[in-house]
Image (spheres, rainbow, N blue to C red):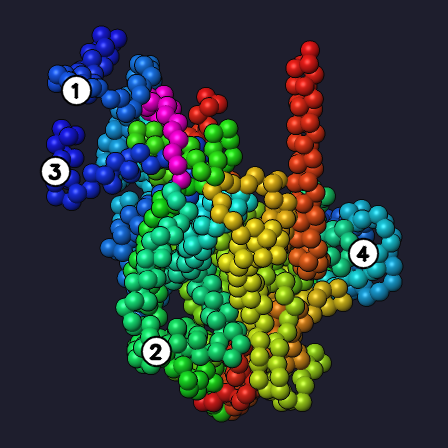
Amino acid sequence: MRRLVLIAVLALVAVPLGRAGVTQGKQLYGEYCVACHGANGMGANGGETGFGPGRSERVQERLGPPLRGVGALAADFYLRTGYMPLRESGKQPRRSRLLLSEPQIDALVAYVASLGQGPKVPTPRPERGSLSDGQRLFTDHCAGCHQVVAEGGYLSGGVAPPLEEATSTQIAEAIRIGPYIMPRFSTRDLSPQEVNSIVRYVQWAKHPDDRGGWAIGHLGPVPEGLVTWFLAATTLVAVCILLGKRLRHE
Amino acid sequence: MIRGIVRFLDERTGSAPFLRKTLRYLFPDHWSFLLGEVALYAFVVLVATGIYLTLFYEDSTATVIYHGGYAPLQGHEMTHAYRSVLDLSTNVKAGLLIRQTHHWAANVFVAAIVLHMLRIFFTGAYRKPRELTYWIGLTMLIVSLLEGYLGYSLADDLLSGMGLAIGYSVAMSIPFIGGNLASLIWDGPFPGSHAFFPRMYIVHVLVIPLLLATLLTVHLVLVALKHHTQFRGERESERKLVGVPTFPGQAPRSLGLLAATAAVLFLLGGLVQINPIWLWGPFHTYSATNGAQPDWYLGWLIGALRIVPGFDLTIGSYTLVPNPFWGGALLPLAFFGFLYLWPFIERSFLTHDYGYHNLLDRPRDAPWRTAIGMAVLTEVFLVFLAGSADRVDVFFGLPYVPQVWAYRVLVFVGPVIAALLGYGACVELQRGERVDRERKRAERLARGEA
Amino acid sequence: MSRAKALLVSAATLVFARRRRPTLKPGERERIVVPEAPAGYDAELVAIWLFLASAACAIGFVVVYALDRLPAHTQLLGLALGLSLAFLAAGLVVMAKRLVPNEELEEDYPEQEHTAEQERIAQVVEESGLTRRRLLLGALGAAGGSLGLALLAPAASLGPAIHMARFYLTPWRRGTRLVDEQNRPLRADEIEEKNFYTAFAEGADKERLPSSLVVVRLRRDQLDLPPGNAGFDADGIVAYSKICTHAGCAIALYRAPLFEPTDPKPALVCPCHYSTFDPSSGGTVTFGPAGRKLTMLPLEIDPKGFLRARGNFDEPVGPSWWGVRLKGPTT
């Protein structure tokens, strides 16, 4: 009984607090987002926009997807990685320095979430996932772009970033969004438990099993070739020079 | 005690004169003559560590479900081949050390051969009477490339499996006979029958090592029969060889180099991770990872394969030249063909020098050779770099497609520029020396008069 | 401490020092072949210590080997063995540079050629008379040559070299069901847009190249299939061979644009050399070195909603060879 009362009180308090966040979020939206994403998140499909905070200082095309129904999940992902605000429309969003503070991001997320019914911020549980399932799922669905231990990769049209800085939440969010040219995996494609396993694997891949020594970037033969020439060959040539100096010069 | 041993041997084999000649064989005294030895000692490490590995490897492509100590692959389906390498790396004491040392030794082996070959080329050591030695060395280089490729493909991991598919496509791309050749090697279409991995294995551990050992022996015997070349000096001439005898002068040097090479290889084998196949996972024809690359000595081929524009050459419905041929087969064929023919090319078209040479040129003494050598090197190096364009995009943000176009232009323009620069440098250096000589002569005359 | 060191050094010296030359017999002249080595007692000491260090590291290697519970075991093993060899190398270098006599000798190069012997050999062969019997030698040569070639013939058993029928064979026929990696049949309504699915022919060996597919769903307005692939889609779902037509790698990348006005079009990309194929136009090559379009499989949806093949691929699967365009795939 007491628990029910507690929950009711909290809910009553949270609603107006949440509302305050949405209002502040709307203000921030007006500053940073409306130029490309349109009023009320309707999206923008043409025209020109000028300078703005976080945007590169030139006139750009007004192009941005609608945000109605994308939910807190998408807003949380794009804002906490610094993908948004985007410096130049049309370029691939990349992880960058955050322009907004934590409370500001919270407010913006609340506002975007209020634009229609969308998915909430996910709460993946990597500790419940299976590392072995994660390896298989990641290899099947992700390694083609992100490389088998998430060191990132190239594909025509964009770059799949390395995942060293990705938090568990961001990984789960990206899986559901499919940002830029990444495929989008719905709950039907990858169940929450499978996402747990993938998240667990990605977290493991940040410090994978390097029992062989210095991992030189987990990229395989290219760094190995550099070590061959710049460490081994140079050392051995130095030894040859040491051994073979012309006797007359000694 | 020494006399006792020598007497024992000589009474039974009559080899005292031979032994004495061997002990007092003269080695020229320049560090660049030791590069071939580095390759030799890397080969010794390869054979020693390789024998150990054969005692653990299983060459079977039958599949098994993994239930071992490495968690991320628990329950995964993999071949016996992959599993045996995984077990060796995770479960066998010192197994990973030997395996990594073996792989580092392969990389260093080829690097040493390349350095040695550069010395041979740029000093003209391949000229008469040493053409045979040169051709055998070149053959050993080609065989080592194949040997390394087969070696790391035996592990059947995701990276090397993708590499085998590409090798298959290059074989297929040979005009007319490619399909038949690939079918012969793989016993049918890729990934081949159960006979394919045992074939790779026996070629890698028996056929090629025997071939290399034989070629190496002939190579060394030829060197000894005609004796080493040497750089020009006060006492050195076409007739007089100056050097350090095998014993006691050269022996500690060579042994020291052996120990140093082995030291570098074992230190790398323990301290720097190479080919962590447990991270890549087992190979499946329907799996792939981004950033897959071959070992460094085949990197030029991936660069070439990437920058050749997309077209199959067809006549009607006959596919005359599938695309991978240009970068995967024609480029190495042209490169090695050129190197084989180079002694002829040089003396027939450039120097008209059919004479016997024991003395080496300095690179500046042969501007044409240096220029052409630099052009060929630049070409190979540019093609190498082209293979890294995708990682450059990921790391530095330089867009991939413009890079590809830049390399397509550079592979034609770059060698020409390198040749011009090389030729110019040689001529300038020669001119500088001539001026120096004139000045010294004038000074001597002036002093003499005074 | 220094007493112990002196004791060790003197013990080692006693055991290993050079013995005096044997006394000469009367009348025997002493001929010095190898000159006196430099004195270098300091160098000897250094070399001795280096060799002892090498021995210590080698023993350390065995100890580390036995203690396999140690962390970073491979690194410690490598360090122990590597340092042992490095100390050995260093000691040998010291010997080479400071302890062996510095000889720089001269000798003549061997003769360029032995014209007299060459003449002898030629004479022997000519006088043997065999060179006169052309027909005999010709026949002998024919026998040897044919025998050599004949011995090569069994190499053709290594694989189907003449009949390339297997290269056109696929496991697909009309009605073959699509399954996922766990052999679960694929339903058409499971295939969502902006994602890619790996599928296989039901009952086939998944590792065979023609068995694997990459399946994506496009909107009707995105599809632009050429006449040769007309009707290959099933409600916008298209299926292609997963094996790249350039060099045989698996096409494991799918470019799925989130916002079409700014993002690149959907594409299937191969991670080896970045051949890019357009799934909306039958697999045409839009970038990269592939010389042939991606092989496409016609699809249909059965009454229960499962995806099935409506026939075989439009072209043979995998990298090109001489006969890849000569005929179509067979079942």
**Pointers 4 and 2 in contact (C-beta within 8 Å):** no
Identify the chain of the residue marked 3, using the numbered disc in the image: B
- Which residue does the numbered mark 1 point to in the structure image? C28
Q: Are marks 3 and 2 on the same chain?
A: no
Label for residue C134?
A: 2
- Which residue does the numbered mark 4 point to in the structure image? A34
- Residue C96 belongs to magenta span: yes
- Residue B345 location, quadrant: bottom right
Marks 4 and 3 sit apart, C-alpha to C-alpha, by: 98 Å
**Pointers 3 and 1 in contact (C-beta within 8 Å):** no
Which residue is located at x 26 percent, y 50 percent? B52
Which residue is located at x 31 percent, y 34 percent? B24
Above or below, comparing residue B119 to residue C22 in the picture:
below
Identify the chain of the residue marked 1, using the numbered disc in the image: C
What amino acid is at disc 4?
Answer: Val
Which residues are the magenta region? Answer: C93-109
What amino acid is at disc 1?
Answer: Glu
- Residue C215 location, quadrant: bottom right
Residue B190, x across and y down, in percent: 43, 74
**Pointers 2 and 1 in contact (C-beta within 8 Å):** no
Q: Secondary structure at mark 2?
A: helix
Would residue B446 appear left or right of C190 to someone viewing this image? Answer: right
Q: Are marks 2 and 1 on the same chain?
A: yes
